[in-house]
Image (cartoon, grey):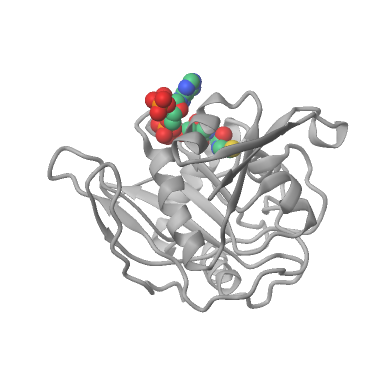
């Protein structure tokens, strides 16, 4: 089951306090249905199957240590956001968030029609551990919680297959509309980088649509260095996307 695994102290520009645990995420090998980059990863969930696009064989060594989650102190009025694994009792919030993000052209999560929520939580944990991957890559899917509310999520791919290495990168994230413009996405990516590094991943590839100003700001705030803007292709809705590397 999903379980906290590592406690790693971290500091951030805001008063960071603690680090906690882990979870999972996956993606599918089938061709993405729409977007590219991180957005592709998220937006493909407009399709009924709703699964990530991590595909193909793992290419990086597996690390037993799972994830890390960090929290920000609120002692000084700072936000307290932590990444943690999805739990069975998150179902109502998860489904609400899913509806909100889908209406926004993205996806909060990747539950399949054929699985119960409990089964989904269990599958995420197996995918984090690299078990029963099928055509998915090993990955970690975490929710972002602030004051007991699910405000967003992160997808951290432990390996890149050919598609991910070009389009979607290592990390995807999203914030529920009601919680945007509070710095949450920036904190989610910052903490996701800690998780990624705990798996030995680096440098980290993060992508976004060229016109996704907010996401580009998030990536750049986390140290992203623009590699190039990839011209849109009809297989990706024709939208140019940015490839960033975070050392
Ligand atoms: C992109 C997204 C994750 C940003 O989440 P967020 O929590 O609002 O982001 P933050 O509050 O951390 O803001 C980061 C920066 O973007 C800016 N920003 C946020 N929303 C913006 C908007 N609509 N227009 C312009 N700038 C915006 C913020 O001002 C901030 O910049 P600053 O640091 O210079 O002040 C969120 O809009 C979202 O989930 N969108 C749909 C999914 C998505 O695009 N995911 C990323 C795929 S690459």
Q: How many marks?
A: 0
Residue 221 versus residue 172 in the image, above or below? above
Residue drawn at (66%, 27%), measured in percent from left and top?
Answer: 210
Q: Identify which residue, 148 or 214, lies in the foreground.
A: 214
Q: Where residue 233 appears, x then y in whole percent?
A: 84, 32
Which of the 4 image quadrants contains residue 228? top right
Q: Identify which residue, 120 or 236, lies in the foreground.
A: 236
Q: Where residue 131 appears, x then y in whole percent?
A: 63, 78
Residue drawn at (45%, 72%), measured in percent from left and top?
Answer: 2
Residue 12 versus residue 5 in the image, above or below? above
Q: Identify which residue, 68 or 26, lies in the foreground.
A: 68
Direction from residue 31 to residue 191 in the image, left or right: left
Q: Identify which residue, 98 or 2, lies in the foreground.
A: 2
Residue 36 versus residue 84 in the image, above or below? above
Residue drawn at (52%, 68%), measured in percent from left and top?
Answer: 199
For this orientation, the residue located farthest to the left is 75
Residue 95 versus residue 101 in the image, above or below? below
Q: Where residue 57 appears, x then y in whole percent?
A: 76, 69
Whether residue 90 can be seen here: yes
Whether residue 180 can be seen here: no
Q: Where residue 220 appears, x then y in whole percent?
A: 50, 35
Direction from residue 221 to residue 41 in the image, left or right: right
Direction from residue 67 to residue 245 in the image, left or right: right
């Amino acid at each position: 089951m999903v379980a906290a695994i590592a406690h790693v102290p971290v500091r951030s520009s805001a008063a960071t306090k603690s680090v906690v645990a882990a979870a999972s995420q996956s993606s599918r090998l089938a061709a993405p249905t729409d977007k590219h980059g991180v957005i592709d990863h998220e937006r493909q969930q407009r399709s009924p199957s709703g699964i990530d696009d991590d595909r193909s064989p793992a290419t990086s060594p597996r690390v037993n240590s799972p994830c890390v989650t960090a929290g920000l102190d609120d002692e000084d009025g700072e936000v307290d956001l932590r990444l943690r694994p999805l739990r069975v009792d998150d179902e109502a919030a998860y489904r609400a968030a899913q509806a909100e993000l889908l209406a926004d052209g993205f996806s909060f999560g990747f539950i399949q029609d054929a699985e119960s929520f409990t089964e989904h939580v269990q599958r995420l944990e197996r995918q984090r551990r690299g078990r029963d991957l099928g055509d998915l890559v090993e990955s970690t899917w975490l929710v972002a919680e602030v004051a007991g509310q699910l405000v967003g999520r992160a997808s951290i791919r432990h390996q890149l297959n050919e598609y991910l290495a070009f389009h979607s990168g290592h990390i995807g994230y999203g914030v529920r509309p009601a919680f945007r413009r509070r710095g949450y996405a920036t904190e989610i990516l910052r903490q996701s980088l800690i998780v990624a590094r705990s798996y030995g991943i680096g440098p980290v590839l993060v992508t976004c649509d060229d016109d996704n100003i907010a996401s580009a700001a998030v990536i750049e705030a986390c140290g992203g260095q623009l590699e190039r803007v990839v011209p849109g292709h009809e297989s990706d809705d024709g939208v140019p996307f940015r490839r960033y590397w975070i050392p």
